[in-house]
Amino acid sequence: MHGAESLSVIDPRAAVDPSVEIGDDVVVGPFAVIGPDVTIGRGTRIGPHVVIRGPCEIGCDNHVFQFASIGEDPQDKKYAGETTYLQIGDRNRIREFVTIHRGTVQDGSLTRIGSDNLLMAYAHVAHDCQIGDHTIMANAASLGGHVHVGDWAILGGFTIVHQFCRLGAHCFTAMGSAVSKDVPPFVMVGGHPAKPHGINSEGLRRRDFGAEQIATVKRAYRTLYSFGLSLAEARAQIDAAAAENEEMRLFAEFLAASNRSIIR
């Protein structure tokens, strides 16, 4: 429900379906259009001309800027009007002209975005994507369907990611990267097609990773990319070290779950 009793401010020029559930202190700007089956959590701000379609659940303290399109039908020719979902966590910043689509029944019927993310202008999140927490998608970064993005990943402007790829935690893609295979955690990639260019050491230092942890990440990177090992040989060495080290464990788990193989 919405109205004065919710302590929210809904501009009279907005079109909000009566079934929408709106928490306290929500602001909805002029000419926003919010359809049925939408829930908006406390403290969230919806800018002017934003369009939100359900089923869609938006958490608390988000800010959706003007002209964003949230929860639209997936751009998948197999989509036939099935009920699918979008879930957005808390404290996200979704900038101008961002597009985020619901899932498809061919996957888990769910597109999910975690918390504390920044999606800059014109970013696109396709159907069935799963985005973690504390990520950044710079201007016009675009995810194909079914892409998974780990916590703290940063996608440079105009990065494009092929469907079904996985991007590991703390990875970094340079501006204009074309990603067609999985990007392991901590790794920096760039180019068209994207190639590995070391580890995201500056990002790790900013997140209070210690010198020993960064050294471990560098050792895993060299195992994957610098010693002339096959991927199977590199995985065996990383697996052997995973029981003793958290960073090696992240590498090992990511490599074990990779279906598209990794950028090499």
Image (cartoon, rainbow, N blue to C red):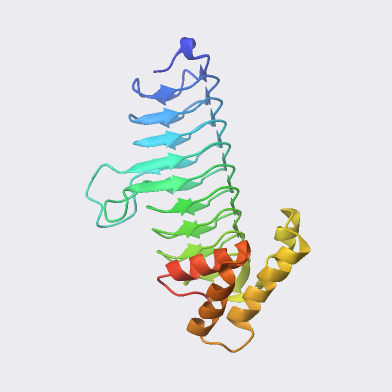
Q: In which quarter of the image is residue 75?
A: bottom left
Q: Which of 175 and 82 is in front in this view?
A: 82
Residue extending farthest to the front is 244
Residue extending farthest to the bottom is 228
Q: Which residue is drawn at 34% across and 49% down?
A: 103
Residue 236 % position (x, y):
51, 79
Vertical relation: 19 (above or below) 148: above
Residue extending farthest to the top is 5
Q: Left or right of 91: which side holds 99?
A: left
Q: Which residue is drawn at 48% across and 10% down?
A: 4
Residue 111 % position (x, y):
40, 48
Q: Quadrant of residue 95?
A: top right
Q: Residue at x 53, y 73 (%)?
A: 239
Residue 195 % position (x, y):
58, 77
| Quadrant where the image shows the N terminus | top left
Q: Left or right of 87: which side holds 244?
A: right
Residue 21 % position (x, y):
40, 23
Q: Nearer the viewer, residue 253 or 40?
A: 253
Q: Left or right of 107: which side holds 155?
A: right
Q: Which residue is drawn at 48% across and 53% down?
A: 124
Vertical relation: 230 (above or below) 248: below
Residue 184: in sight, yes or no?
A: no
Q: Quadrant of residue 90?
A: top right
